[in-house]
């Protein structure tokens, strides 16, 4: 009996001598790998967010340049001045000339635009690039027209098109007479799909994705189209920390929960618009390799214990 007890103690001691270093190594490896993987994925998300922020800013600057070039063209200036002087009805021939210019411009710039429109000082559209379907539309209540009237370029929050109901980003430029009098505004109406296609083409892991919120937290680009111009992330309790940072025009990484899924996201501001872009990935997705390592370590420990016994 004593001999058996002694043999058991020797075997147990030998097993512990084998297992303790192995377990220590497993715990250390698990902690180190978890930390390194988390840091690597956070840095990757942040780098992508910064890159997409820069690309978005450059793309929108090009759109502003296009709208400004159209607004300062001789035809636009002359016809807007005539409408301001004689009214829409009294400038019908001139308006036709302007509309032909808008149609030609629309053909050149492609399918990323819903329309190009010109309105008078009261915000009434009198010329467009799509066969007159926007004529008579009142834009007086739109923020972008009010800003144009105040000699500012509005590039903040997309809206639902009064014509189609689709999300659009109007880029509105004031039009002035040769003497400097405000005579109306020209707007290119950019489809949000134009931005979405470029941003969402970037893939992050298996299920990660980029998204954009406006200066108030309203989603304007997201793979789930039901959220666009409908879901305000600032209203979600589980996202308060990251949304506060995004709306504060900060750059960084934070963790949060969205629709019951734990996630991390890198984020960066789009300075030109006051928007913020996030690049998100489920935590469980990039932690999968850590979980696999844990299972392997447990299996190896069991095997070594069996051998030692």
Image (cartoon, helix red, strand yellow):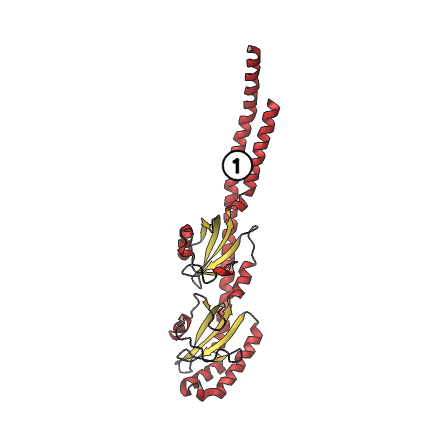
Secondary structure type for disc 1: helix
Q: In this rendering, is residue 48 above or below 7?
A: below
Judge left or right: residue 23 versus residue 84. Answer: right
Residue, disc 1: 30
Work out which quarter of the rendered image holds the N terminus and state it: top right
Viewer-closest of 115 and 245: 115
Furthest toward the right, the residue is 307
The answer to whether residue 5 is seen in the rendering is: yes
Residue visible at 43% across and 77% down?
185
Q: In this rendering, is residue 305 above or below 223?
A: above
Q: In this rendering, is residue 46 above or below 82?
A: above
Furthest toward the left, the residue is 150
Viewer-closest of 118 and 306: 306
Residue visible at 57% across and 11% down?
3
Residue visible at 50% across and 62% down?
56
Q: In which quarter of the view is residue 149 placed?
A: bottom left
* Image location (x, y in percent) of residue 128: 50, 78
Viewer-closest of 130 and 178: 130
Work out which quarter of the rendered image holds the C terminus and state it: top right
Viewer-closest of 87 and 167: 167
């Amino acid at each position: 009996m004593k001999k058996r007890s002694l043999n058991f103690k020797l075997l147990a001691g030998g097993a512990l001598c084998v297992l303790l270093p192995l377990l220590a190594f497993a715990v250390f490896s698990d902690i180190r790998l978890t930390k390194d993987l988390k840091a690597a994925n956070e840095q990757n998300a942040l780098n992508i967010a910064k890159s997409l922020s820069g690309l978005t800013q450059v793309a929108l600057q090009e759109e502003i340049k296009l709208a400004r070039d159209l607004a300062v063209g001789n035809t636009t200036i002359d016809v807007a001045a005539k409408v301001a002087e004689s009214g829409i009805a009294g400038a019908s021939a001139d308006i036709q000339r302007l509309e032909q210019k808008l149609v030609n411009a629309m053909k050149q710039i492609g399918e990323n635009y819903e329309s190009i429109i010109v309105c008078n000082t009261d915000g009434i559209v009198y010329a467009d690039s799509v066969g007159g379907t926007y004529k008579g539309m009142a834009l007086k209540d739109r923020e972008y027209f009010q800003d144009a009237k105040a000699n500012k370029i509005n590039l903040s929050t997309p809206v639902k098109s009064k014509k189609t109901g689709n999300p659009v980003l109007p880029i509105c430029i004031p039009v002035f007479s040769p003497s400097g009098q405000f005579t109306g505004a020209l707007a290119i109406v950019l489809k949000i799909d134009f931005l979405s296609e470029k941003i969402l083409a970037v893939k992050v892991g298996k299920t990660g994705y980029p998204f954009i919120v406006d200066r108030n937290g309203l989603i304007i680009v997201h793979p789930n189209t039901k959220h666009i111009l409908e879901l305000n992330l600032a209203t979600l309790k589980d996202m308060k920390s990251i949304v506060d940072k995004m709306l504060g025009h900060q750059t960084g990484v934070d963790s949060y929960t969205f629709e019951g899924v734990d996630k991390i996201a890198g984020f960066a501001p789009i300075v030109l618009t006051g928007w913020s872009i996030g690049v998100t990935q489920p935590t469980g997705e990039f932690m999968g390799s850590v979980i696999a390592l844990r299972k392997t370590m447990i299996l190896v420990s069991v095997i070594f214990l069996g051998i030692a016994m």
